[in-house]
Amino acid sequence: MKRSFATLLIVSFSVSLLLAQEEREPLGVSEQEMQKLLIHRVDPVLPRDTRVRLHGTVVLRAVISKSGVVESLQMVSGHPMLVPAALDAARQWRYRHFEVNGIPVRVETTVRVEFAEKSEAEAETSVPESPVSVSAEEMPGRIVHRVFPVYPPLARQARIQGTVVLRIVINQLGEVRDTQLVSGHPMLVPAAVEAVKKWRYLPYESDGRTVEMRTEVRVIFSLAGS
């Protein structure tokens, strides 16, 4: 009887530890330590119609789940025009789970996404036919599903407001397949891109066929009481 009771106490204690871990903030782990656990890395890809030759590093703050999946990403530094591609790539990375005393835990770490400088030959590679340009004024009536951005906590704390302008390409199905930054505060850009990529539009027809279209959208960030 005593042994059964002791076993029950041990099990209850273990469950309590697991529940406590769920409630705690992610454990901070160094970038170097998490690189050893990286098992699937996706390199960033800039849109093929990007005219500006960009290279450099985007630094992101990442929360990794107990199963090794990237839960969330937040920009730390990097060129704003590289951030969307960096987010797309890092979101697909996978890790072996990080353990503490044999128990998988959520972690917070730093992620660096490198963009190598393109050679002249790569920069001059021909691109497919451009999508049809549609004015921003025509687009509100064509949108069928809009997702509002989540205000970045740090930007909210710093009382940062403003408008992010994005140039987007919409495919034949009405899905946003590409985003390119035109202007906007760097701390607001990732949230704007994340939201706009989920927008859906009515397909666009030209000369009797459905075609891709290019337009600009504005995502406004404003704080109550301002």
Image: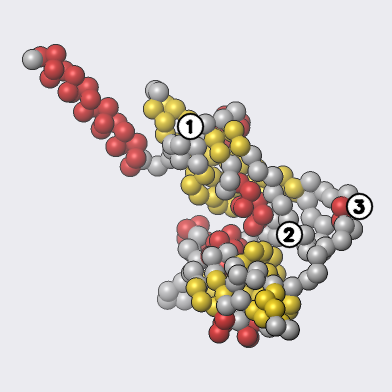
Whether residue 2 is situated above or below residue 8 in the rendered picture:
above
Query: Residue at point 54% right, 78% down?
Result: 143
* Amino acid identity at mark 1: His
Does label 2 or label 3 sit earlier along the sequence? 2
* Amino acid identity at mark 2: Pro
Question: Where in the figure is residue 45, as x and y percent of width and height?
Answer: 72, 52
Task: Find numbered disc 1 in the image and state the secondary structure of the residue it sits on.
Answer: loop
Would you name the residue on which mark 3 appears? 121
For disc 3, the neighbor class at 10 Å (few under 14, some 14 to 19, many from 20) is few
Question: Where in the figure is residue 67, as x and y percent of width and height?
Answer: 46, 36
Q: Nearer the viewer, residue 212 or 182?
A: 212
Query: Residue at point 47% right, 58% down?
Result: 153
Question: Where in the figure is residue 95, as x and y percent of width and height?
Answer: 54, 35
Whether residue 130 is situated above or below residue 27 in the rendered picture:
below
Query: Residue at point 57% right, 75% down?
Result: 201
Query: Residue at point 55% right, 71% down?
Result: 200
Would you name the residue on which mark 1 appears? 97
* Amino acid identity at mark 3: Ala
Whether residue 49 is situated above or below residue 86 in the rendered picture:
below
Q: Quadrant of the N terminus?
A: top left
Whether residue 178 is situated above or below residue 18 in the rendered picture:
below
Does label 2 or label 1 sit earlier along the sequence? 2
* 155 with respect to 25 (left or right): right
Would you name the residue on which mark 2 appears? 47
* 181 with respect to 197 (left or right): right
For disc 1, the neighbor class at 10 Å (few under 14, some 14 to 19, many from 20) is many
The answer to whether one can see residue 161 in this image is no
The answer to whether one can see residue 180 in this image is yes
